[in-house]
Amino acid sequence: MVNSIVLPIKKVFALVDSKIVVEIKDEERKLQGRLIAVDEHLNIHMDQTTEYIHDQRGRTLGTVVIRGSNILTIAPVI
């Protein structure tokens, strides 16, 4: 049973080169873009990033790096 547990970090590593949405701790702000890289601290590097505030499209940011301690959720774009 223990062998079937998948750690959350492995799920995030599996999302590299796919589109994701990241909710950060700053005022209901979400960033959507392509995940380029992630490290063991869940710091992430994204490209083609767009900012969404209260589910309304905001600025186009391009390439961003987000510190893992500022992330609330990471989800794939379906």
Image (spheres, rainbow, N blue to C red):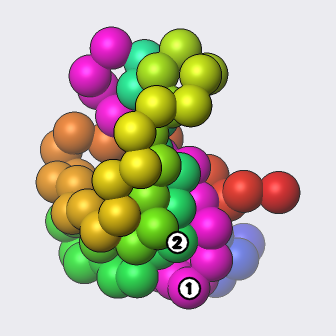
Q: Is residue 14 left or right of residue 45?
A: right
**Amino acid type at mark 1:** Asp
| Occupied quadrant, residue 43 | bottom left
Question: Residue extending furthest front?
Answer: 59
Q: Secondary structure at mark 2?
A: strand
Where does the image place residue 50, in percent across and percent down from the top left?
47, 49
Identify the residue at horizontal 21%, vertical 63% (top origin): 65
Q: Is residue 33 left or right of residue 4?
A: left
**Amino acid type at mark 2:** Arg
Where does the image place residue 27, in percent across and percent down from the top left?
33, 14
Residue on which disc 1 sits: 17
Q: Look at the image and tell me whether residue 17 can be seen.
A: yes
Q: Is residue 46 left or right of residue 43?
A: right
Along the line of sight, the residue nearer the viewer: 26 or 41: 26
Identify the residue at horizontal 22%, vertical 39% (top origin): 70
Q: Look at the image and tell me whether residue 7 can be seen.
A: no
Where does the image place residue 48, in percent across and percent down from the top left?
46, 68
User: Distance of mark 1 from mark 2, alpha carbons?
Assistant: 6 Å
Q: Secondary structure at mark 1?
A: loop
Point out the tag, 1 or 2, that comes first from the N-terminus: 1
Identify the residue at horizontal 35%, vertical 64% (top origin): 62
Which image quadrant: the N terminus?
bottom right
Where does the image place residue 21, in percent across and percent down from the top left?
56, 49
Label 1: how many Cα within 10 Å (few below 14, some 14–19, many 20+): some
Residue on which disc 2 sits: 34
Q: Which residues are magenta?
A: 13-27
The answer to whether mark 1 and mark 2 are in CB contact below 8 A is: yes
Along the line of sight, the residue nearer the viewer: 39 or 5: 39
Identify the residue at horizontal 61%, vertical 22% (top origin): 55
